[in-house]
Amino acid sequence: VNVFFVLSGLTVAASLARCRNSLDFIIARALRIFPGLIVCTIVIVASGLLLAECGVANYLKDARVLEYMVKTISLSTGAAELPGLFRHNPYPSVVNGSLWTLKFEFLCYLLLALMGSMRLLTPGMMAKLLPIGFVAAAAFLAYRHGGQPDQIEQFARFWLSFSFGVALFLFRDRIVLSWGVAVGLWAAMWFVLGTGLERTVAPIAIGYLAVVLGTVRLRWLRHATNKLDLSYGVYIYSWPISQAVLTAWPDVGTANLICLSALLAMGIAALSWRLVEKLSLNARKQVYDLVTVPLLQIRLSR
């Protein structure tokens, strides 16, 4: 999850730099998250008609179906339940647990957009703000070390990871990517494991290594991923697919579960990219015009 937020900060900061303004950026981020999530939610609810143990009639009239859709699409939780679904699995009744980080992700987008609108995302300003933010987050996480992380602690960790990714983009001409530094950061991470500094050092060490690995030249892989982005589809479909496999095949075994779930998730993610996510992103200009033209007309009328 730390790597996810570091890479998200890096790529999303690059996206903001290409956008016309913060509104354009928010529209782009919303189109990246919500259309795919809405379709995924509908697919899962429809699948419940086949998988739920309570019967079709009881399933359809249960208030938890609508509650699941509202909670999932609003990003309020990833632990919403559907009636009669996955009750006997190792994680009983958790339909799509992976989604719990999405609300933090979108909140990071909003904060980044706010910083961009305030013209704070310049190397000069960030050279002052980032150290303050890192020290504050590190002190807070160290102080809260040892207990069960709450929502505030999770956001502090994720914002630290995300802002580190933003820094990697803003200072890309100055930051040296080397295996030696990566090994040194990993050594530091292992040294602080189990201490109050772990949740500060780990995102930096793991995120930096991920970026260094990204410099490895695998042209065939880069060519494939530039055409077909499976990342989000795999993220939103993998958990319910694993739960469905366990329901249909309780004795599947760990290795078979991982392989079968991965293959199914990548196949469905490819469909999600082609039929939903890519089309949504291509509609970005039209959505931006749809939002801004009425605003401009109201402003001119005044």
Image: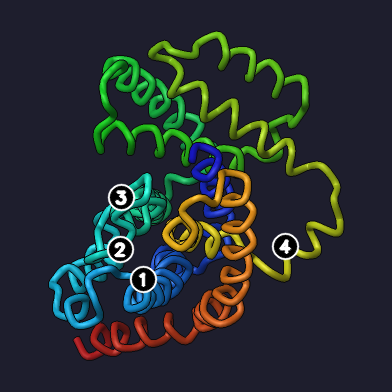
Residue 204, x across and y down, in percent:
55, 28
Question: Where residue 73 sits in the image (x, y, percent)?
Answer: 30, 67
Indicate the secondary structure of the residue bearing disc 4.
helix
User: Is disc 4 surrounded by few (<14), some (14 to 19) or many (20+) residues within 10 Å?
Assistant: few
Residue 59, given in percent of the width and then of the height, sits at: 21, 75
Q: CA distance from mark 4 to mark 3?
A: 34 Å
Name the residue tied to disc 3: 92
The residue labelled by disc 2 is 85
Res. 120 visible in picture: yes
Q: What amino acid is found at the position of numbered circle 2 in the picture?
A: Leu
Identity, as a three-letter code, of the amino acid under mark 3: Pro
* Residue where numbered disc 1 is placed: 51
Q: Residue under label 4, please give it.
A: 225
Q: Residue at x 63, y 19 (%)?
A: 185
Per the model, the C-alpha gap separating discs 1 and 2 is: 6 Å
- Classed neighbour count for the residue bearing mark 1: other residues with Cα under 10 Å, few (<14), some (14–19), many (≥20): some
Q: What numbered label is drawn on residue 161?
A: none
Distance between mark 2 and mark 4 Cα atoms: 34 Å
Callouts 1 and 2 close, C-beta under 8 Å: yes
Q: Mark 3: few, some, or many residues within 10 Å (few <14, many ≥20)?
A: few
Q: Are marks 1 and 4 in contact (CB under 8 Å)?
A: no
Report how far apart the C-alphas of labels 3 and 2 lie in the structure: 8 Å
